[in-house]
Each structure stands twice: as C-alpha cells, then as structure tokens.
Amino acid sequence: MPFKAFPDKQEESTTTTTTSSMDIIEDELTMLTDDPKSWHGSSLLDAKQITGPGLRLLFKVASSMRGLVRDDGGDDRLRNHVINTIFYEASTRTSCSFQAAIKRLGGSNLHVDGKGNSAAGKKGESLEDTVRCLECYSDVTILRHPQQGSVGKVVGMARKPVINAGDGVGEHPTQALLDVFTIHDELKLYQYKVKPHLTVTILGDNKNGRTVHSLAKTLCACRKVLWTNTLTIRYCTPAGLEMPEYVVKYVDKFADEGVTQETVYTIDEAIENANVLYVTRIQKERFATEEEYHAVKGSYVVDEEVMARAPENMIVCHPLPRVDEIKPEVDKDRRAAYFRQMENDSVAGYNFPHMFGLFIN
C-alpha cells in the first residue's frame, strides 16, 4: 500500500517561493478522522492533524487494546511487520512504551540509538539518510530528535509512515493523545449528558515542554466531540518560560468557540477551580548555563499542602520524568494520576504502530 503522508503530492517544483518547507509539510499532512482509511500509511507530525472524530476512534481502539492486554496479554496483529524506533534523545517511557506495544502485538522492532553506537552517532550520517536506509527494512518509523522541525524534514522525504515521538522543543503529539485519553478516562467525561466546562492548568516549563504544546492544540481541536463545550487553558510558568506565541495564536483561533486562555502567577491561582493540573519539569537540558536553570528551578512545587487546598476532583498529570516539581508524598493522593497516565502510555502505544502502519483491516 502506498505511503500517504502526502496523498496528492506532485513532483517537487524548482520554483523558488517564500513559503518555508515546514509550512508546506504541515499544509499537506493528512487529517486523521474516524475513517480508518485516513490513518492507513499516514504520518503523524503535528497534533493539529487529529480531528475530534479521529480522536474518538483512537479512544475506541485504546479501550479495546486495554482489554486485550489485560485479558490476553496481546495478540499477533503486527506479525511479520517491522517497526523502527530511532531515538536521538534520551527516552525511557516513550521508547519503552512503543517497544512494549510492538512486542505485545507480535511485531518486530529495530531500535537505533542515534547518539550511540550507530552510523548516525559515530560516523556523521545525516538523519535523512539514516531513516531512508532503515525504512528499507521496516514498515513504520518512530522518531525522536533534539532539533525542532527535524521530524518534519524526514516526513517530507520518507516513503513510509513516520510517527513524531518528540522533536526538540517542538511537538510531542503521541504524548498529547495519551494525555487527553487520561483526562477523559480519569474525569469520566464520557458519563456526562450535559458537557461540563473544563479548566486545564499547565504548570511549569511551557516554553520548552513539547508535550504541552501538543496538549493545548489537541484540547482545542477535539473538545466538542469528546468532553466539553467550553474550555479554559490556564498557564502558570516562571518568567521567560511562557507558552510559545505560535501555540497561543493557534488556541486563539478557537476563542469564538468557547475556548479561553489565561495566565496566572501563583500556585494557588493555578489550582483554583481546576479540573486538571498538568505539571512539567523545568528542563535543565534546554538551558545555556547552570545559572539560568537554577534561577527558575523549584519555582513551583506541588506538595501535600498544595493538594490540601486543591479541588477535591482535580487530577494531577505529569508526562514524567519529574525532578522536584511534585513531591513523592503526593503519590499516595488519589488525585495523583501520573502513574496511571503512564499505564495509559502503553495502551496508547499499542495504537500507533497499529493505526499508522497499514494494519487496520
């Protein structure tokens, strides 16, 4: 089956234009809907590709996958299929969740550490050449890279599906999908006949946190189909680590449809009437100097005292790993959802090779 990241893509023109290559890529990406055919052979680069109906389909498959793994441990629907996981940045949860999913569904995995003992790490091979070579042996590539926009460049030249598992400080759409699945599941939003207002506070490093860039987009695009008619996204972040302007502008597009954004500065403002407190670590590896990092490290800390003041039905999420922004004492609070969120990571991980890799029959 042919690759469909660009289903109607024509031969590249030699004409010079002022439009960036990334703009072209995003314009031509397949929108993922409740029609399984829209997922077949497509790539996932940006959270904006996921439509509300598409997310509903993903949730349906995720729920069935959870039952499958619980009852049977998996199946062999990926038998005779090979999936690459190529990671140029450190990863535990994302890498392992994909590898576990591939194995539980009977597939084979080729894992490459782009910084380690590989041609990419030791011999200076380009990212494009690494992917071009490895897709000769496989059906799908799952890629993480430290440079924002790098996965988009690969999608533009790849012949087979590419799933963005994080590109620097850019996007992390697969994380966003498991996050909204967790929110929907934890708050039992599927039970409401009258859709409630939802307030999601994003606390921490909003500038460098690629997970929250994708989360904000996904919450906006899919809210009416799944859980809410009106939505507030609240930002609470140290000075200099605000949400990027391009994300804020994207969310602004939904202002006439009941979506509001607000910025607060204290943790008490952050938790007031919140349904979800989504916490992120201050990302040390993104700072130029130790001094810059330590100037903002520990700006916001969620502990037992904070939880005592928080709404009874507010859940706490975190993409992990954490450093000091959530104290271990919070783990025993029933509202601490982040380890259950990681369990959903494996459930969501079962979906992506399955749905993008030509495997829905």
Image (tube, rainbow, N blue to C red):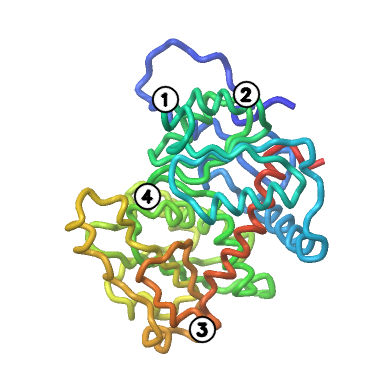
Q: Nearer the viewer, mark 4 or mark 3?
A: 3
Q: Alpha-carbon neighbours of circle 1 within 10 Å: few (<14), some, or many (≥20)?
A: few
**In the rendering, which numbered label is found on residue 123?**
1
Q: Is residue 199 above or below residue 171?
A: below
**In the rendering, which numbered label is found on residue 181?**
none
Q: Disc 2 marks which amino acid? A: Asp
Q: Alpha-carbon neighbours of circle 2 within 10 Å: few (<14), some, or many (≥20)?
A: few
Q: Position of residue 304 (x, y in %)?
A: 40, 86
Disc 4 and disc 3 in contact, CB within 8 angstroms: no
Q: Position of residue 66 (x, y in %)?
A: 73, 62
Q: Disc 4 marks which amino acid? A: Lys
> Rounded to the nearest whole Å, what is the CA distance between mark 3 and mark 1?
49 Å
Q: Position of residue 229 (x, y in %)?
A: 56, 66
Q: Is residue 286 above or below residue 227?
A: above
Question: Closer to the N terminus: mark 3 or mark 1?
Answer: 1
Q: Alpha-carbon neighbours of circle 3 within 10 Å: few (<14), some, or many (≥20)?
A: few
Q: Which residue is mark 4?
A: 249
Q: Secondary structure at mark 2?
A: loop
> Rounded to the nearest whole Å, what is the CA distance between mark 3 and mark 2?
51 Å
Side (left or right) of 233 relative to 188: left
Disc 4 and disc 1 in contact, CB within 8 angstroms: no
Q: Disc 1 marks which amino acid? A: Lys
Q: Is residue 30 visible?
A: no
What is the quadrant of residue 236 in the picture? bottom left
Q: Which residue is mark 3?
A: 333
Q: Nearer the viewer, mark 4 or mark 1?
A: 1
Q: Nearer the viewer, mark 1 or mark 2?
A: 1
Disc 4 and disc 2 in contact, CB within 8 angstroms: no
The residue at 82%/41% (across/down) is 361
Q: Nearer the viewer, mark 3 or mark 1?
A: 1
Q: Which residue is mark 2?
A: 8
